[in-house]
Amino acid sequence: MKFSNVFGKVIKRSLKSEQDATSDVEWNPFSTNLRENEKLLQEQMGDSADIMFTKFTMQMKNNDTDTDALLVVVDGLVNEETKRNNILKPLQEHPISIEPNEHLDQVQNRLSIKHIAVEKNVNKAVFNILNSKGLLIIDGVDQGLILDMEGFETRTIAEPSNEKTVRGSHEGFIETTSTNMSMLRRRISHPALQFEQKTIGKFTRTNVTIAYMKHITDPELLQRVRDRLDQIEVDNIDSSGNVEQFIEDHPYSIFPTIGNTERPDLAASLLMEGKIVIMVDGDPVSLYVPLLFVESVKNIEDYESRPFYASFLRLLRAFAFIVSVTFPAVYVSALNFNKAMIPTDLIVPLFQARETVPFPLAMEVFFMILMFEVVREAGVRLPETIGSALSIVGALILGEVSVSAGLVGAPTIVIVSLSYIASFMITPIADVTALLRLGFVISSSIFGMYGIIVLWLGILTHMVSLTSLGVPHMAPFAPFYFRDWKDAIIRVPLRWIKYRQKSVPHQQSRRIKSLPKTGGKQ
């Protein structure tokens, strides 16, 4: 009984979200005349070649004349086998005993479709047809049946190429929201996992799904997400990146304040922390809020391994971020302004390497950083086999040939290369490190070490002011939540992390109630 009540509430909520998505559609009722309804639909959808109007007749037991019917679908978006065997065949081969009533119950009982809805508005029916559903209308009835019969080709589930792990799940989101929702449901089999759908985009009518845990997610945060999405009025939504830039708190900051992932296991873990996942139909990348900066040094695989090595990797990632951003700038500052910073044994080799270089040091470093960016971008955009070959050839050209020709000093190649290698450890903010690296080089070339220090202070001040849909981006450091430090730069054993992060608003704080004892062994 309880399960049926819960299931009924889920169905009602799903239907309500569909009604809300089309609540702004103008009223245009069906006619009882089939020809008039067909004409109305053709006026709405035009003469597009992919719109299929299938006319057929339904047999009636108590009537000598057959009843005309019309099935409207978009070619390529529906399952042809479902259309043929579950709709046309039952209605044509098996006579209906009585005339269809207002809700077409007799017709619905003949169809083997997982979801059927009655629709009275032509305009709403058109949007449903274009959203991979079918419309069945019958002569003499002033309403139609919306049939869930989507069957377009989808990509197979595979591990995301940019979020690979050695241990753990190897599944990744795909472009179909329904499949992504099922992957989350398999990991969280509880009615508290809720999905809300919204339709955004005047022409694209893109489905945007909000996923959250009902008894864990903070209601104010959830309402904030709903309000931001409701305020989007645009012609088209092409990807999750559009939604991210429309709803974020600081659209002019170089730091992202909304996270993204293609991993369902990570998304499920974030939901259990009280965060909200936003999925955009047609895009495998899902968004989540709020995003904390400390998550840049975290990885889903950290929770699969022992806490000691996981903590070491997090410290290494934090150090890699600093090295990637400031190493070239410190090199420029040391050689141009602060020669006392250089060890005595390195002064002569460093200056000898620059004797044949015709460019100033700052220009040389700046030029090499730009060349590395060009090679990396080209390697990413080209096909995988060509891209990897280009990266190797590009590295050889930028390395051996440039040094041999006297265009670049060998120490500069080493410094810039180490900076880029370090950035590979913090891929979530790789674009941020690339911009900061250039900014620090320019600042250090003008003001030396003082420029680096002042720029760091300015960046930290800016980061402290950032919020992710109202949640401080730099928590648990600013504001200071000492309890959350157990899972920040270092990670203590999981049995010590009994409470959810205070940095993320939530309703239930405790997540571990009891665990088996260790037998007195530490």
Image: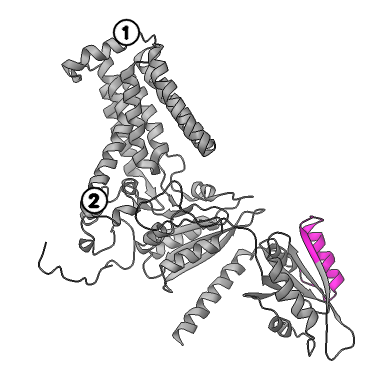
Give the residue type at disc 2.
Answer: Phe
User: At x 27% / y 55%, what residue is drawn?
Assistant: 305
Structural crowding at the residue carrying mark 2, measured as other residues with C-alpha within 10 Å and reported as few (<14), some (14–19) or many (≥20): few
On screen, residue 421 above or below 398? below
Q: Residue furthest right?
A: 64
* Residue 395 horizontal/vertical position (percent): 42, 26
On screen, residue 31 above or below 248? below
Residue 144 visible in this rendered orientation of the protein = no
On screen, residue 387 above or below 47? above
For marks 2 and 1, the one nearer the N-term is 1
Question: For this rendering, which residue is in front, 435 or 77?
Answer: 77
Residue named by callout 1: 355
Determine if the magenta segment contains residue 29: yes
* Residue 521 horizontal/vertical position (percent): 10, 64
Q: Quadrant of the C terminus?
A: bottom left
Residues shaded magenta: 28-53
Give the quarter of the image for residue 463: top left
User: At x 19% / y 71%, what residue is drawn?
Assistant: 516
Give the residue type at disc 1.
Answer: Glu
Structural crowding at the residue carrying mark 1, measured as other residues with C-alpha within 10 Å and reported as few (<14), some (14–19) or many (≥20): few
Tell whether 161 sits left or right of 115.
left
Residue named by callout 2: 480
Determine if the magenta segment contains residue 101: no
Q: Secondary structure at mark 1?
A: loop
